[in-house]
Image (cartoon, rainbow, N blue to C red):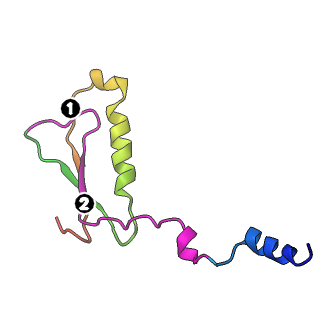
Amino acid sequence: MRRLMPLLLVGTVGWGCQAAGDRAPAKASPVDCSATYVACGCGCCGGVEPQVQCLSCANGDDLQALIAKDQAAAKDPQCAVEGCSVGTKYMYCDANPP
């Protein structure tokens, strides 16, 4: 039995080591600095150019957070009584000069 104990321990612990990359969480994908988005809230008015709002890719401005905020605003029940608005075009100006 004494001779089997080390084998049982090795079997419990495992034979090999796993590389850190095997268990490491995947890193978030890098920011797409060429992306743009027109936020309209309840809706954009037709025939009107949206205002440009610059974001900075170098500073890590988060376009996805603005998209989520705009989509949440579009679901607001008050949209039924509000009119259209001039949209806001968000873009990374350090990557895409207006």
Residue 73, percent from left and from top = 35, 35
Residue at 35% over, 65% down: 31
Considering depth in this image, is 76 or 4 the residue closer to the camera?
4
Q: Is residue 55 left or right of residue 86?
A: right
Specify start and end residues of the magenta stretch as a single range. 18-46
SS of the residue under disc 1: loop
Residue at 40% over, 51% down: 65
Residue 51, percent from left and from top = 20, 50
* Crowd rating for badge 2 (residues with CA inside 10 Å; few <14, some 14–19, many 20+): few
Residue 42 can be seen, yes or no: yes
Q: Is residue 6 left or right of residue 91?
A: right
Q: Which of the numbered marks, if any, corresponds to residue 35?
A: 2
The amino acid type, in three-letter code, at marker 1 is: Cys
From what the image shows, is residue 76 above or below residue 69?
Answer: above
Whether the magenta-drawn stretch holds residue 98 is answered as no
From what the image shows, is residue 85 above or below residue 94?
Answer: above
Considering depth in this image, is 56 or 51 the residue closer to the camera?
56
From what the image shows, is residue 9 above or below residue 61?
Answer: below
Q: Nearer the viewer, mark 2 or mark 1?
A: 2
Q: Quadrant of the C terminus?
A: bottom left
Whether the magenta-drawn stretch holds residue 23 is answered as yes
Residue at 23% over, 65% down: 34
Q: CA distance from mark 2 to mark 1?
A: 24 Å
Query: On the image, numbered disc 1 is attached to which residue?
Result: 84
SS of the residue under disc 2: loop
- Labels 2 and 1: the sequence-earlier one: 2
Q: Is residue 28 left or right of residue 38?
A: right
Residue 87, percent from left and from top = 21, 43
